[in-house]
Image: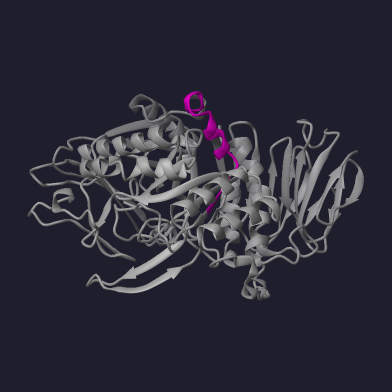
Amino acid sequence: EEGVHMAMAGLLKTGSALLVTWGDPYTALNVSHTAPDQEGTLRLSLHLTKSARACELHCLGQGGLTVLASAYRQRAVELGYRVPWEEKLKTRPQAAKLFGACNFKLWTALARRIDKDMVEQSVDVKWTFDEAAQIAEHLKHDLVLDDVLFHLGGWTRYGYDCKHPDNMPANPECGGNAGLADCARRVQDCGYLFCLHDNYQDIYRDSPSWDEVYLQKNADGSPTMGGVWLGGQAYYTCAREAVKLAQRPENLPMIREIANPDLYFIDTTYAVGPQECFDPRHPLTKQDDIQWKIVLSDYARDLFGMFGSECGREWAVPHADFFEGLASVAGNYYHRLDPQALGGRVVPFYDMVFRDCIAIHGKYGYKPEEMAEQVIHHIATGHTLYYHALGQHLYWHDPDGFKPIASSSSPRDPALFTRADNGWAEDMCTWDRFMKNTQAVLGPLNKRTSQTLISDYTFLDEARLIRKTTFGDGTTAVVNGTDRDYVIVSPNWGEVALPPYGFLVDAGDFVAFHASSWQGHVYDKAPLFALESLDGLPVMHTRRLKAYHGFGDAILPLWGTVHEVQREAILEP
């Protein structure tokens, strides 16, 4: 089910911890909460079918999340799931470029819409390959974003989610093979990772390669139907047959020859739970399905150097370099799952087990003016953001991107991080302001902590809206999700008042904050600052640092001196 990407459940009560684990994919976890707006009753059950015969209960004694995570990490080691970056980088040193990189994605370069009767309804070029390259150059030279995973979808012969698996040549509407190759080169010339989006789970009746021999079959022999996407009704391929399709000379080998991306993304591979196939020519159990998805992952990873897919599963950690969809979905915590409906709060348990093994991103589009809660959630987990819903063509030329955003009547302004008054991105469009502000904080934070776990995660208020994260290297992040100021006492910076959606990040040589008071100075307009040491020493002792000012008052008290930083400045004591 959504949100369950490890074969475990944990229960915490009156200071004690219980860990439940299982090893068979025919085990289903069911959770319900009666009266979620009150104390209610939490109910948990396991449904075992077919080969599933047992689960294990681990009584851990006194402890909380940290104890629970430590116990499950040991199990993940025993199962071979935990392969830390320290090991992965020995054979794939280029994966270090994922550290600190935001996930920037143009989903549908070509959107061709086919109805359920396989009749073409529309063809919409949202970005040519030349425009995609221009966007990368804009991010690099105008926004000065250095660390970007640049992801392109809809480049395939018939457009996004159409006529898979027949991808080549690249569609002529956007520029063909030559245009795609030029786009890849220009993105890589910006110092960015270039990634292509593909799919081998879905096949369509109008695909040139359509043949029922490839299909996953239900127990009654009928084809397993997928979703209805741009290309119309999709059908599932059997995971074993999907590998054969990907390995055809005209598929992944040709894509590598033409575009040579730095890494590859095969959609849905980890998003859909383990499947069964009942075709007698290639029957699969759920265990078999997992193994063939691992084969596909390893093949793409070995061919391109790095690999990622949608969502993420613990068994996939050794076979991938990034997951897309675990951090957030469309500006929410999950796709359909509502934590409040269960009376719950989200905790970064996956990060307490696997964060030092895999890069984790969110997925899908959202409105940046509604994202403040998710921004502080990403600060609390140390993940970079995903930018997936920018306008068509050269988005910063669109006048609509400069329209004023209505002020919020609530103390918690969801559009907070789109502000740039008095700051670096003033006079830029909404998306550029949002990307610059958030990446200025999340990029350096993620780069410093990618090879560490979250060692402790604590709620500082009864409503569980103020959170403190401690990373394995000692970096701390405190975020305020309430509608009132919250004063923290920092070991290095003394009393710091955090307004609604305020935060303080202290990584030693990197400090960032949105605060209403700092170093004894009370602000009229709470600013956003990010301070990065340039000599490796902690910010409080450095002889030289770069100060980024996102919005609000430009006053920065530091080292006993009051500085004024309008956009960005190099400061010395």
Image coordinates for residue 163, horizontal then vertical, percent: 29, 59
Q: Indicate left or right for 412 with 270 as reference.
A: right
| Magenta-span inclusion, residue 92 | yes
Pick the residue in front: 55 or 381. Answer: 381
Above or below, 405 relative to 320: below
Identify the residue at image location x=49%, y=66%. Answer: 126
Residue 115 in sight in this render: yes
Pick the residue in front: 172 or 306. Answer: 172
Above or below, 58 relative to 494: above
Identify the residue at image location x=39%, y=71%. Answer: 123
Please state, as top left, top right, bottom left or bottom right, where the C terminus lies in the image: top right
Identify the residue at image location x=62%, y=38%. Answer: 447
| Magenta-span inclusion, residue 306 | no
The magenta-colored residue range is 88-104
Picture colour scheme: one colour
Q: Quadrant of residue 116?
A: bottom left
Image coordinates for residue 341, horizontal then vertical, percent: 40, 62
Q: Indicate left or right for 183 with 480 as reference.
A: left
Pick the residue in front: 118 or 173. Answer: 173
Image coordinates for residue 426, horizontal then vertical, percent: 76, 64
Number of numbered discs on residues: 0
Residue 14 in sight in this render: no
Query: Which residue is situated farthest in the front direction here?
Result: 178
Q: Quadrant of residue 99?
A: top right
Q: Quadrant of residue 60?
A: top left
Image coordinates for residue 466, horizontal then vertical, percent: 61, 52
Above or below, 79 relative to 256: above
Q: Indicate left or right for 168 with 383 as reference.
A: left
Pick the residue in front: 244 or 91. Answer: 244
